[in-house]
Amino acid sequence: MNPGHFSWPARVYYENTDAGGVVYHAEYLKFMERARTEWLRAAGFEQTALLAERNLLFAVANMEIEFLASARLDDLLNVSVILEQTKRVSLTLVQTITRSTREQPETLLIRARVRIAMLSRDFKPVRIPMDLLNRLQPPLDEQP
Amino acid sequence: MNPGHFSWPARVYYENTDAGGVVYHAEYLKFMERARTEWLRAAGFEQTALLAERNLLFAVANMEIEFLASARLDDLLNVSVILEQTKRVSLTLVQTITRSTREQPETLLIRARVRIAMLSRDFKPVRIPMDLLNRLQPPLDEQP
Amino acid sequence: MNPGHFSWPARVYYENTDAGGVVYHAEYLKFMERARTEWLRAAGFEQTALLAERNLLFAVANMEIEFLASARLDDLLNVSVILEQTKRVSLTLVQTITRSTREQPETLLIRARVRIAMLSRDFKPVRIPMDLLNRLQPPLDEQP
Amino acid sequence: MNPGHFSWPARVYYENTDAGGVVYHAEYLKFMERARTEWLRAAGFEQTALLAERNLLFAVANMEIEFLASARLDDLLNVSVILEQTKRVSLTLVQTITRSTREQPETLLIRARVRIAMLSRDFKPVRIPMDLLNRLQPPLDEQP
């Protein structure tokens, strides 16, 4: 994989919608968390193993999220993960959710900046291990 | 409390509804679980403490559920718990969800029979402690 | 597709788990609903179009569900749909959720019987259209 | 009510937690949405009636959210709504989620700034009606 850009599909089911006829706003956070999980898995890290073997977990520390347009039942969405910045104990990701259909060009629904912190099992911040950082960061000559 | 009959209110928010305009079917299971939790709490048992101090938890073993009518956004529901049967390692509860409004008499939305099993922390069936059983069961002379 | 047997994968994410360390019981209903949606889609029916063009929707009328074993974070599950019985206004489905891993043979986690009723947009029972029934039912010579 | 400051309780049930042993991050958005709903209700506005009678709904336009500490199963939380700014078609709210227990002083878990936009039924921005604004805004002499 190109670790600098990753995307994962998400289908909208009834479980994700609300009585307004569109996706309930908190559900987009689930779609983004699924994409982060698959981004880690694609880099070789399962969260279950990170916790069981190394006592490490990622938790969302803060998030800015813009709700630009609404997804609807049966929509097929595309959720992206771009690593924007790495710090000692946290990563900042830019995530988007877009929808493409045969009828319409790609529509940007969600744009978010998400900072995830590395924590120990007892929820204390800890340094992100170098092997993890190395596999998540794009090599220098691919960086913009 | 009368341990033989317990009820707990639940308000319907956007989070509980779906694009059909009514409550998403799996959400009723959450309402019923909240009522069981409060039924245990009213009898003096917090699930957090049951797990931390006694390595015990209840898990749903099986459920029969009838969806008779739909709840809608803003509805105020009433969720009941009636202890129907006690066994060595499980309890069978009858639960209903009803809605009352000024305009309409009480409407029965959900009727369910739920068997919850007592498990150890590693998910093995264990005998329900006598102090728990005694506080959940109505005294003999109140039983129907 | 063979309309008599259909299955759909479901990955377990954090969103599906609870503090007991396993999948929250109501989440299995979401997995089963996703599989029913994809079963309908595989037969050529999108629920969005059924509602918009023909004022029809399926709603769960009742369900018996056995929780036999627990799924965990990162598990990859398989959710099946088998059409057991067709009636004038409802279908009865048998659904299972299983887990397969490299280490273990297939484990049955959930077994359910789900009756879904065909409703009009105002939630009245209506006859299931013949074209829908025909595409969901296996041809006679494939039936067991 | 004092429309400038409003708070609403939220109990943490199993449905809100995840396998990390704490509340799943997206669930805090549900708690905040419940508080906004009750804040509107306390000012005399039911969202069901706003939509049915005036074709109006509020949708979250953007959100900045800091996850400062984690809530756990059985916690009783307090969710606040403070109106920070009113514009022609949107309101900006500051929301917090805190936990108080007998053992500990109040702990701030979540701090968020939420902009909600007034939309028509077809999701176009529309001017917030004056009667709604008047009842949500604190009188001038109570403003800080």
Image (cartoon, coloured by chain):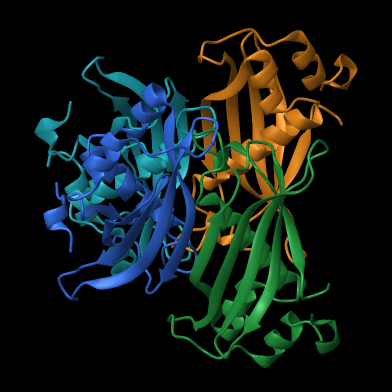
Chain colours: A orange, B blue, C green, D cyan
Find the residue positioned furthest to the right: A141
Q: Position of residue D102 (x, y in %)?
A: 21, 19
Q: Is residue C63 above or below residue B2?
A: below
- For the residue pair C98 and D62, the one nearer the viewer reads as C98
Q: Is residue C12 above or below residue C35?
A: above
Q: Looking at the image, can residue A70 be seen? A: no
Q: Position of residue A111 (x, y in %)?
A: 61, 39
- Give the residue at x 29% y 31%: D77
Q: Where is residue C136 in the image (x, y as percent from the top left)?
A: 72, 80
Res A70 quadrant in image: bottom right
Q: In this view, does A117 lie above or below B80?
A: above
Q: Looking at the image, can residue D94 be seen? A: yes
Q: Where is residue A54 in the image (x, y as percent from the top left)?
A: 68, 14
Left or right: D72, with A34 as reference point? left
- For the residue pair A21 and D18, the one nearer the viewer reads as D18
Res B39 quadrant in image: top left
Quarter occupied by the C terminus of chain A: top right
Res B141 quadrant in image: bottom left
- Give the residue at x 20% y 42%: D137
